[in-house]
Image: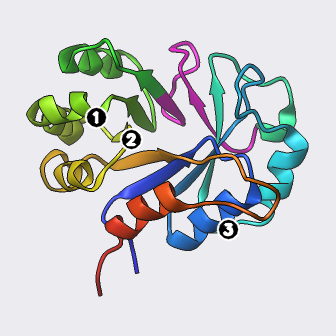
């Protein structure tokens, strides 16, 4: 069974999220390798988790700077830095204060394999036609807090290349509540 859209799970910090995401058929798993964030995953943990999952693209979420540790280098890089953007990288845009036309200008001037655009739910609802036009011209993943109605609108009207949802911290190793992730992925499952 596949998903209606491509999905990236970001900020993954534990094996539970990675294995669950891979088992549900997501396309990309992102690990935050920016040392200044709360979701930082060091090279040792990154390698341990990556060795347990297969069939998914691995993304190192670097933020503004490339890591000095070469253990992260064979994977896709997600950056917010226009100087690091290229056609083999993922470019992240925090769009909370930007118009859709400004987003288009940013994407036009920054090459990327695809773009992850962080928006508030109300931005997606109010600009769905403009976002649909943008998504028809660029490979866009929308990132927000999704509810079922917003997922429906995203899949049927906006039609991005995919969406991003966020992983979370484990309660303790091996114990994880997947409620938010599971709701989104189960809604996106295609029926046979």
Q: Earlier in the sequence, mark 3 or mark 1?
A: 3
Which residue was labeled with disc 2? 145
Percent position of residue 6, x then y: 39, 57
Q: Is residue 127 visible?
A: no
Mark count:
3
Instruction: Write the residue at 79% across / 57% down.
Output: 49
Residue sticking out furthest to the right:
44
Residue sticking out furthest to the bottom:
192
Of circles 3 and 1, which is in front? 1
Image position of 37 with respect to 145: above or below: above
Q: Secondary structure at mark 1?
A: helix
User: Is the residue marked by circle 2 packed among few (<14), some (14-19), or many (20+) residues within 10 Å?
Assistant: some
Q: Secondary structure at mark 2?
A: loop
Which dot marks residue 54? 3
Instruction: Write the residue at 48% across / 64% down.
Output: 182
Q: Earlier in the sequence, mark 2 or mark 1?
A: 1
Of circles 2 and 3, which is in front? 2
Image position of 156 with respect to 85: above or below: below
Percent position of residue 124, x then y: 22, 34
Q: Answer whether labels 2 and 1 touch (C-beta < 8 Å).
A: yes
């Amino acid at each position: 069974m596949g998903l209606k859209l491509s999905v990236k799970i970001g900020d993954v910090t534990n094996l539970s999220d990675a294995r669950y995401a891979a088992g549900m058929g997501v396309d990309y798993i992102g690990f935050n390798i920016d040392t200044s964030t709360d979701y930082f995953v060091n090279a040792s943990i990154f390698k341990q988790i990556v060795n347990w999952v297969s069939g998914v693209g691995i993304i190192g979420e670097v933020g503004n700077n490339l890591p000095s540790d070469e253990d992260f280098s064979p994977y896709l890089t997600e950056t917010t830095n226009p100087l690091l953007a290229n056609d083999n990288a993922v470019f992240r845009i925090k769009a909370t204060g930007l118009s859709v036309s400004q987003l288009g200008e940013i994407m036009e001037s920054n090459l990327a394999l695809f773009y992850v655009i962080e928006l508030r739910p109300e931005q997606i609802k109010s600009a769905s036609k403009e976002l649909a036009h943008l998504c028809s011209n660029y490979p866009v993943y929308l990132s927000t807090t999704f509810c079922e109605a917003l997922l429906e609108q995203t899949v049927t009207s906006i039609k991005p290349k995919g969406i991003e949802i966020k992983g979370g911290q484990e309660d303790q190793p091996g114990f994880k509540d997947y409620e938010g992730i599971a709701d989104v992925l189960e809604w996106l499952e295609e029926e046979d």
